[in-house]
Amino acid sequence: MGKNKLAKFAEVAQLPNVIECGARDFSDNPAALAMKGRWHEDFFHNDNPIVLELGCGKGEYTVGLAQMFPDKNFIGIDIKGARIWSGAKYAHENGLENAGFLRTNIEFVDAFFASGEVSEIWITFPDPQMKKCNKRLTSTNFMKRYQTILKTDGLVHLKTDSNFLYLYTKAMVEENGYAVKCITDNLYEDLQEDPILDIKTYYEQQWLSRGIDIKYICFALHHKDDFVEPEIDIERDTYRSFGRNARVV
């Protein structure tokens, strides 16, 4: 591991807007679990709605949304401390008190938030997990987790380059009767006036530079007991990210 990455890990651990709990058994920071149900009082010190960005990477969306919506609180979640460093450091140095970060595995998200504590969830450019359904961040496996922390009819946003994940998510939403608020397979063509277009992540700019359309779906997650995984054959994406034999589409 390079010195630069080690330095970022060390700095992230000291930033007041970051909470770390990376171990599977949470033994490295059991106090992080005490934040469950206490984010408004102990972290943000206000009653504004809480919005999560899952797999936030460098935190471009967390920071961008925090600047765009000062009346909401935003928490970026990612296991990669060196990535979180970028957004967390920027938010701290620029006084963005409505932006925070949680370093942990996304599959443990329901361990850190109480029922109804979260108002919205953003999922930005996740791995489509074309071979592992249960690992897809829009699978019913994760919907079960999300509904335990989201308020009733809280919004879930997916922004992706992957046609595979977009079609899978669309089918999952239809099978489970979630109310679609917005859907498009070409975000920058169909929603030209929407302010969310002003935020483009590092990876999103890579996809756009390769001529790949950005897909977006927003739906309301009502609470339910029975979940249905869609039985659908979807053509897999034929390209990979930069650094992995990338091909232009």
Image (cartoon, rainbow, N blue to C red):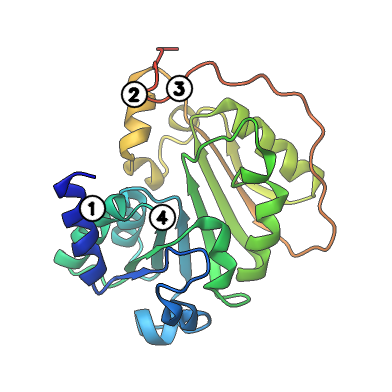
Name the quarter where the N terminus is drawn.
top left
| Res. 196 in view | yes
Kindly report the distance in space between the C-alpha atoms of the residues bearing marks 2 and 4.
20 Å
Tag 1: amino acid: Ser
Foreground label between 3 and 4: 4
Horizontal and vertical percent for residue 169? 66, 39
Per the image, the residue denoted by label 4 is 79
**Label 1 element class:** helix
Per the image, the residue denoted by label 2 is 243
Tag 2: amino acid: Gly
Per the image, the residue denoted by label 3 is 240
**Label 4 element class:** loop
Kindly report the distance in space between the C-alpha atoms of the residues bearing marks 1 and 2.
21 Å
Name the quarter where the C terminus is drawn.
top left
Per the image, the residue denoted by label 1 is 86
| Neighbourhood count class around disc 3 (C-alpha, 10 Å): few under 14, some 14–19, many 20 upward | few
Q: Is residue 25 above or below residue 86?
A: below
